[in-house]
Image (cartoon, rainbow, N blue to C red):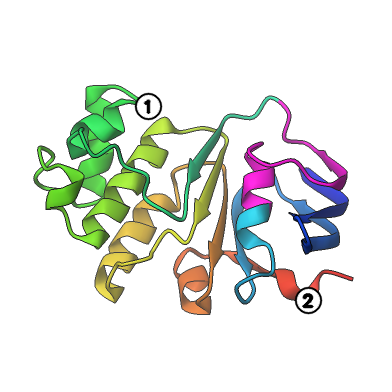
Amino acid sequence: MIVLSHMNAGYPGKPVLRKLSLTFPDTGVVALMAPSGYGKTTLLRILAGLLPADSGTISGIEGKKIAFLFQEDRLLPWLTAEKNVEIVSDSAMAKRWLKAMEIEDVGQYPYEMSGGMRRRVALARALAFGGDILLLDEPFKGLDEALKERVASKIRQAAPLIILSVHDREEAELMGADVVQLDQMQK
């Protein structure tokens, strides 16, 4: 289990997480929901080790391999879709996940792709990296409903524990996630 106790975090002049205590299971899918500004992205970045908490403790994450999908796609513009995924994996794994994300032309560069295609390449990269925990920040941004359903079915089995931030309860349900209403947990 991952246990957060009395966690506080924020940015200069703007507290975001206040006295947050939360437990995540070892396996399953957990969706963080709250309006913008309640710390979903901040919490994901703390879990990934990209941002320190101001205070509080976190345990159970030591030694875990973590894959992260940022809110922005962060693709390297000078690399093709396939090469963007290969930077975290090998060619076979890159092709497997690009196919799973329904990317047919793996030789396209990011500037040649639609927003939804770039999102799916970024997802393929996170999935190809693999690990014990998959952190997804708004994974379905830019995808239509039918595509969300097809992609979600492939993501659900990608890691023992998946923690994602969503604004839409339907997206949480699509992933079969236990919902944590982050804005209602802070004191």
Callout count? 2
Q: Is residue 109 above or below residue 8?
A: above
The answer for how far apart the CA atoms under marks 1 and 2 are is 36 Å
Going by the image, does 48 lie left or right of 23?
A: left
Q: Is residue 182 above or below residue 103?
A: below
User: Could you say which disc has been placed on residue 88 in the image?
Assistant: 1
Sooner in the amino-acid sequence: mark 1 or mark 2:
1
For label 2, the crowd category at 10 Å Cα-Cα, with few meaning under 14, some 14 to 19 and many 20 or more, is few
Going by the image, does 107 lie left or right of 3?
A: left
Residue 59: name its quadrant.
top right
Residue stretch rendered in magenta on the structure: 43-62
What residue appears at the point 11 percent right and 47 percent down from the top-left corner?
A: 104
Residue 75: name its quadrant.
top left
Q: Is residue 140 magenta?
A: no
**Residue bearing mark 2:** 184
Residue placed most toward the observer, 95 or 141: 141
Q: Position of residue 112 (x, y in %)?
A: 12, 51
Residue placed most toward the observer, 11 or 137: 11
Q: Quadrant of the C terminus?
A: bottom right
Q: Position of residue 92 (x, y in %)?
A: 23, 26
- Residue type at mark 2 is Gln
